[in-house]
Image (tube, rainbow, N blue to C red):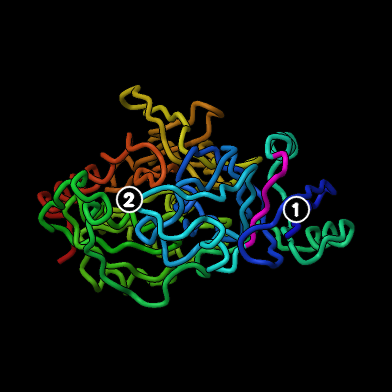
């Protein structure tokens, strides 16, 4: 099966099609992780995006149900240098091509991914179309130009659940003997699903939380009626600025209950504090991004997946402390409020895939809830 990837600026790559036959549109971005392709594909933060994996050989350990980070893949398509025809791992259930076909997802391989990534680093992330059914270059370029832009796009409400649910599964469920026993559940955390990953929920359970997941558009009043000890704001796709329903809800809950946000949740907190966000040239996607903790001068290697960032100069210094900085490009990676129980990070402390340097942040959230309870600040 032949396949073609056409970018909106006229650059075209021809290669071999795998997975499902079809045509998908999205912003094309690259991820530098060496493994974890299934977790990447099933991360809802990739909704609306075609993912290039820079590691040249993908698929050799297959796929299995436990490694999925959501109910299905949310990426629009996959671009790789070489897609392995052999899956050799005792956990494997399907090879990568079968997995993609099962979910109707097209992939293109046998192209020069180094040239493609260099092009995006120079010119920035852009709209593209991946097709195995229409191989007319001019027509595909026009289709890419006519596809939706990521700027101004609210995707969080599209990937979120439609009804609340409980989560009680710890990390030991997938790690087996390597996973630690979950702490006894002491605090009730309400987690907003803007595109939440399963391992975030597992990490919260590991830290001793009972978790209720709610849809992205749940109001502050409805959340507070659940009597939470803490609020978690998840990762998610798209532009944060159109997600005003979330900004308003967070603004209404600040100070009433401890709040912890990551990725899109961090950006929503930034907006709720009066800040602004902006689009990065080609985003941060991968498992090897160095971040400096400005409060203790320690460096963490982090997993990241975002295309927007909070402008640190737009935040009120009288209220906000900047806590983390990206050592690659100096973008803001974390903040906390000076007086309210609220903090956030731009990166992914739950990993899956990626390093576990930042897993302590879930314990930090629990400590914040403990301090809040001890002070008696919670609502009666």
Which one is nearer the viewer's eye here, 183 or 244? 183
Residue 373 in the image, given as x and y percentages of width and height: 13, 53
| Residue 110 is inside the magenta segment | yes
Residue that badge 1 annotates: 5
Residue that badge 2 annotates: 260
Which one is nearer the viewer's eye here, 202 or 247? 202
| Residue 190 is inside the magenta segment | no
Which part of the image, by quadrant, shows the N terminus? Answer: bottom right
Q: For numbered disc 2, what is the local secondary structure?
A: strand
Image position of 156 with respect to 32: above or below: below
Q: Nearer the viewer, mark 1 or mark 2?
A: 1
Which one is nearer the viewer's eye here, 373 or 22? 22
> Which residue corresponds to the image point at 71% horizontal and 65% vertical from the top-left?
23
Which one is nearer the viewer's eye here, 106 or 282? 106
Label whose residue precedes the other's in the sequence (1 or 2): 1
Residue 212 in the image, given as x and y percentages of width and height: 27, 67
Q: Do the numbered discs 1 and 2 sit on residues whose CB atoms are within 8 Å?
A: no
Residue 194 in the image, given as x and y percentages of width and height: 44, 62
Image position of 182 with respect to 219: above or below: above
Alpha-carbon neighbours of circle 2 within 10 Å: few (<14), some, or many (≥20)?
many
Q: Residue furthest right?
A: 138
Q: Is residue 264 visible?
A: no
> Which residue corresponds to the image point at 40% horizontal and 64% vertical from the top-left?
193
Q: Residue furthest top?
A: 297
- Identify the image quadrant of residue 234: bottom left
Image position of 213 with respect to 89: above or below: below
Residue 41 in the image, given as x and y percentages of width and height: 51, 55
Q: For numbered disc 1, what is the local secondary structure?
A: strand
- Magenta part of the chain: 106-112
């Amino acid at each position: 099966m032949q396949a073609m990837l056409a970018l909106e600026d006229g650059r075209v790559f021809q290669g071999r099609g795998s997975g499902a036959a079809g045509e998908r549109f999205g912003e094309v971005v690259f991820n530098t992780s060496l493994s974890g392709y299934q977790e990447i594909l099933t991360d809802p933060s990739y909704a609306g995006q075609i993912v290039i994996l820079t590691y040249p050989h993908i698929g050799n350990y297959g796929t299995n149900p436990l490694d999925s980070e959501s109910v299905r893949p949310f990426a629009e398509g996959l671009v790789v240098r070489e897609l392995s025809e052999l899956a050799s791992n005792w956990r494997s259930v399907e090879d990568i091509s079968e997995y993609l076909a099962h979910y109707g997802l097209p992939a293109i391989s046998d192209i020069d991914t180094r040239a493609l990534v260099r092009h995006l680093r120079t010119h920035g992330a852009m709209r593209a179309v991946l097709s195995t059914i229409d191989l007319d270059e001019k027509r595909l370029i026009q289709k890419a130009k006519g596809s939706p832009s990521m700027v101004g796009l609210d995707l969080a409400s599209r990937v979120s659940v439609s009804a609340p649910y409980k989560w009680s599964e710890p990390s030991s469920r997938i790690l087996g003997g390597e996973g630690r026993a979950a702490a006894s559940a002491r605090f009730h955390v309400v987690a907003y699903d803007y595109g939440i990953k399963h391992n975030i929920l597992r990490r919260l359970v590991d830290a001793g939380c009972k978790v209720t997941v709610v849809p992205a558009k749940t109001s502050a009043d409805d959340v507070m009626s659940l009597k939470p000890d803490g609020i978690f704001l998840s990762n998610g796709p798209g532009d944060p600025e159109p997600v005003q329903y979330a900004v308003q809800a967070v603004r209404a809950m600040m100070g009433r209950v401890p709040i912890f946000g990551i990725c899109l949740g961090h950006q929503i907190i930034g907006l709720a504090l009066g800040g602004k966000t902006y689009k990065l040239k080609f985003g941060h996607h991968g498992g090897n991004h160095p971040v400096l903790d400005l409060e203790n001068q320690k460096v963490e290697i982090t997993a990241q997946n975002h295309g927007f960032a909070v402008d640190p100069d737009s935040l009120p210094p009288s209220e906000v402390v900047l806590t983390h900085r990206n050592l690659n490009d100096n973008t803001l990676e974390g903040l906390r409020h000076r007086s309210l129980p609220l903090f956030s990070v731009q990166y992914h402390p739950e990993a899956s895939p990626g390093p576990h340097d930042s897993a302590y942040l879930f314990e930090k959230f629990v400590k914040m809830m403990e301090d809040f309870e001890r002070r008696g600040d919670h609502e009666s």
